[in-house]
Image: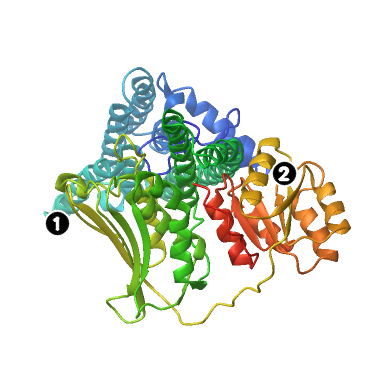
Amino acid sequence: MALLDAKPPSLDGRSPVPLAPPGVSCLAMSDASRGPVWSRLRRRAFAWADRFLPPGAAALDAEALRRARLTPLLVLAVLVWTPVFAYFYGPLRPAALCQQGCALLAVGCLWIQRLRSQRLAAHLLLGLYTAAIGALTLGGGGAESPLFSWFVATPMVAVLMLGEFGGVVWAGVTALCLAGVFGAEAAGWELPSTVSADVRLPLLVASLGGLTTILFCWALLLESSHAELAEALAGARDRAERVGAEKAQLLNTLSHEVRTPLNGLLGSAELLLARNPRPEDRELLEALAASGAALQALADGILHRARLEGGQGPGEPRPVELGPLLESAATALRSVARRKGIDLRVELAADCPKVVWSDEHYLRQVVLNLSGNAVKFTHRGEVVVSARRGPLPGRFTVEVRDTGEGIAPERLQKVFDPFSGSEDSTGLGLSIARRIVEELGGELKVESELGRGSRFWFSLPHGARPAAEADRTALGRALLADDDRVGRLVGRRFLEALGLEVDAVRDGREAVECARSRPYQVVFLDCDMPGLDGASAAAAIRAHSPAVPIVALTASSDPEDRSRCREAGMNAFLSKPISGDRLAEVLRELGVGVGSSPPLS
């Protein structure tokens, strides 16, 4: 089960998303589409910034890493532009001392970040920046100072370094500084300009250059984080698709490997039970059959659930004969019901549409799950599968009621939860039934009374086109091809019990040779045979016997395998493990008459 529960990397933000496959950095991934010069400069800038990251920074997620890198990059900008402003403010000793102090404190912020806290370093750096700009603005003529526009960078940088709340705090601080400058001028305070006229223009150019540098660092990190996130999401999507494909392949392989031995196990048990064994032997055989059926139900449930979760829901609606479909589901369970002494019957109301438009496979699966659940928990009385016209125009209702154990009121709301069954059940059948009914456009409901039985029902939309009837032929000889020795033995015995003469071969080439040498009324081909597989053998047989019914025996649950068999000319499918009742039903559907042999169980 651990393999089936494997999930792709989380994309919901509750756990870190791996930014690149092992051994490949996101930086390398996002630089792949850029030129070598840009990649080299960007890599060197980030390599320098990473020297000042705190210990354990390698474990940070993309957002925390971006914020931590921003502090040294802004300090680098301060160090680059401090000599420029010191040059223009050089004649003013206080201004020069302010510039030198800013550079020293900025370097100190790097060590605070490396040794203690990135947030503390960010607050100190923003405070230093705001104080320095405020001092230089007051000494440069107030609102007319070339550095006055630098205030706008404070809240933007704060958002990047501290997040939304930090950005709001520093936006408030910036607003207070601006209000102080404008308030002082409005109150008539004269803010003398200590910058001479001959350096004002160069200082303005340098000021805009410095502000551009800071905004460029901000835009660079923002774009880089977006590029890394896009690369991470693309990689995660590709890995999720790869995991999904591997999971589907695993499930199909498990389906085949489990169904093949189950075919021999359940078939042998059914044949032995048909021989009226001694009571003590019957009890053991019934336990064997019940355990095998439980294993089959578990495998089918896991496969159906995985298929639905993978988006392989119902396909395009096709005309389905409702009565034969309900009878087919009941036939698959009738032998179990007979052994338990339960009356399992199908009732079709007079006003019920004969043909409905739906997905036949999934609709049958719902009826089979509901009926199987009813038979399992009914020990005396009856199980009735019925269909009638729905409560609303254009809909039909299918109902399964039983006289079984019933469901306690406190468990009634959890009956459709997966893996919530009793000790005799996995709880997958009802969960899958509800999911399929919802996919088909309906709602599965339940009523139950403890000790008196349960009633499950659902309503679905229907159409009105009639289905074609199969041609009828006569009883005769059957050809069976299966590479599994036990599968050939069980299949032969079932067919002989139904009144057919059987030629059994072990591969597709022998089947083609037999079909060319004599006529057969029906051909059974295992899909997965070495050499010439079932689909290829069917195509070869169909070339010279276009009318013979061909039945696929398959342990695979892959819809593509069924499509391939259908394209090769096969008429019907029998999923392993097969039962005598289901085999007889398929022969009747194909028009191959079934003899009057006694029931198999």
Residue 162 position, x and y percent, is 31, 38
Cβ atoms under marks 2 and 1 closer than 8 Å: no
Q: Can residue 5 be seen in this view?
A: yes
Label 1 secondary element:
helix
Mark 2 vs mark 1: in front: 2
Q: Is the residue marked by circle 1 packed among few (<14), some (14-19), or many (20+) residues within 10 Å?
A: few
| Colour mode of the rendering | rainbow
Label 2 secondary element:
loop
Tag 2: residue type? Answer: Asp
Instruction: Give the quarter of the image for residue 351.
Output: bottom left
Q: Can residue 87 be seen in this view?
A: no
**In the image, what residue occupies the spot 77% across and 57% down?**
538
**In the image, what residue occupies the spot 15% across and 48% down?**
409
**In the image, what residue occupies the spot 70% across and 38% down?**
484
Label drawn at residue 186:
1
The answer to which of 377 and 337 lies nearer the viewer is 337
On the image, numbered disc 2 is attached to which residue?
482
* Residue at the left extreme, as displayed: 187
Q: Is residue 484 left or right of residue 362?
A: right
Label drawn at residue 557:
none
Q: Is residue 250 left or right of residue 481?
A: left
Total numbered labels placed on residues in the image: 2
Give above or below for 507 relative to 567.
above
Residue 60 position, x and y percent, is 41, 29
Q: Is residue 595 left or right of residue 542?
A: left
Residue 230 position, x and y percent, is 51, 47
Mark 2 or mark 1: name the one nearer the start of the chain: 1
The answer to which of 277 and 95 lies nearer the viewer is 277
Residue 552 position, x and y percent, is 67, 54
Instruction: Give the quarter of the image for residue 173.
Output: top left
Q: Is the residue marked by circle 2 packed among few (<14), some (14-19), or many (20+) residues within 10 Å?
A: many
The answer to which of 363 and 184 lies nearer the viewer is 363
